[in-house]
Amino acid sequence: MTDLNLPAKCNNRVTTPLAKPYHYRRKGTYYLRMRPEGSVVGLSVSLRSTHKAIAMQHSEELQAVVKGWQLDNPNATWEDLRAILREESDRLLRTKIEPLLRADTYNHYQSEIDLLMQIAAEYPLRSVHVTVLECAVEMFKAAQRRLHSQPRPLLELKERFDQEAFEGLHAPASVSLSPSVSGPQAPSSNPAKPTVKTTFRELADTYLAEQRANLKPTTIKNTTSYLKILSEAFTACGVDDVQTHTRADLVRIKEHLGKGSILKGDKGRSVSTVNVFVSYLATVFTWATDNGLLKHNYSQRLKTTKGATSTRTGFTVPQVEAVLKTARDYSTEAGRAATLAAITGARLNEVLQLRKRDVQGLDGGPMAISINEAAEGKSVKNKGSIRVVPLVMTSSWAPDMEAFREFVKALPDDDSPVFTRRSLRLDLAKIIRTAVGDNPDLVFHSLRHTMSTLLQNGEVSLQTAASILGHTTKSITFDTYGGNMAQDTLRAALEKVLPKA
């Protein structure tokens, strides 16, 4: 990188001649772009927030970081820079953090770390700046630990910055950080480095705080739930410090996750479900290792392959009819949800998040449902899940589609949800048990398996079936270059395989 020529001093003593910074958004997240006057080379850094007010506050503070470290000031001395470290570490210790702002504050500290790391990689530096950047990064990491109720690392750094003989993190401390209680003692030639325990809960919270801006609300909800159960498993197995975890610890935790409850009479989680937990565990551990928060990662290749396939199966045609009858007897809304799932193969979440604008053909003609995420609070499993599925009104499984059309047409506006009952998801689970008994392999999702089986038995092409179910075909030709399949083709396939009225 060319010499950026940024004459700068700390705090308010000298200003840095930067061009006017500007902000932009990418996928909802705000970013800051900075460059020196007269230069086309600059820095872009995420402000880690989708809220403009918070992002602008972070932007101002990040710009102060660039101005504050005297990055190419040839007259900068270590004492000048050490003074900044002392002032900043003291401020980070004394700052009151509001509970609701802990996640945003953590993300802001991460933005400062990212910016300092980018400066370290790209800016022309003198040796004194290398030292101060290293110290600053460790200081903000310690500030993040403080947000997890661990202020000791930040306090110890501040005490080192206060020492007159302090020359950097890799230089030995001239005096012990621990106060003497029995008079002066000779300093140890190899002072023990204090260790701080890290629980899985703390690691998981840190991971979520950093990833929150990049995840969908439903993904955050699911991830939080899985990580909570994992945290409880770590506690139950006595693994209270992930820094010292072993492979045997993780194997024991995996076995614990698969156990059932004798009191509840259940047999435990399936192998495939335990593998999902292992995936989340490996994701957090890999992220922590890559970011220097974890020394060792023994979570790789921890999944069980034998017996890992899902045991869920589809309903038979009589079982589908029993489910539909039970649902319609239970409530009109439950009947509509079960009907849509049965005749389209849509996932439960795809059905329950439908809005009025997603139901096509309200003014007459063929009906269809558009499965998309083009509204706040809606989400789909992946890109391939976005599709339009015809509603076959001639099937014996859908005797009341005209009534459904009139119901949706009467909704007040295009954003009106088709399904409003908050307990409908639980109601449908009870309906399945009532209709087909306590077979754990038969769930609401089995309606989707049934549709897949019908399409296969009806010799419907793979591409047509994938367009109906929202699957990817693993084919570059169809998944990357193929457009939406004609509705007539999809409707003909569904009319072929669904039971006739």
Image (spheres, grey):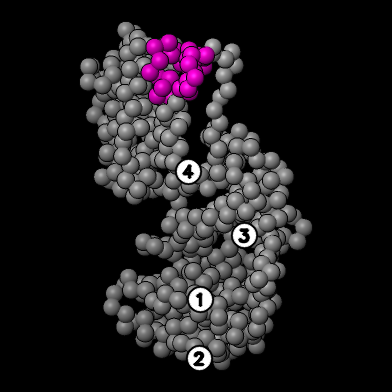
Q: Quadrant of residue 80?
A: top left
Left of 315 or right of it: where is 408?
left
Q: Earlier in the sequence, mark 1 or mark 2?
A: 2
Which of the two discs, 2 and 4, labels the residue nearer the N terminus? 4
* Span highlighted in magenta in the image: 157-185
Q: Which residue is disc 1 drawn over?
A: 426
Q: Residue at x 54, y 34 (%)?
A: 196
Q: Residue 69 versus residue 43: which sits nearer the camera?
A: 69
Q: Which residue is mark 3?
A: 473
Residue at 39% across, 84% down: 405
Q: Are marks 4 and 3 in contact (CB under 8 Å)?
A: no
488 and 403: which is toward the camera: 403
Q: Eyeballing the image, is 238 above or below 310? A: above
Q: Is residue 11 left or right of residue 232?
A: left
* Sequence-earlier tag: 4 or 3: 4
Amino acid under disc 2: Asp
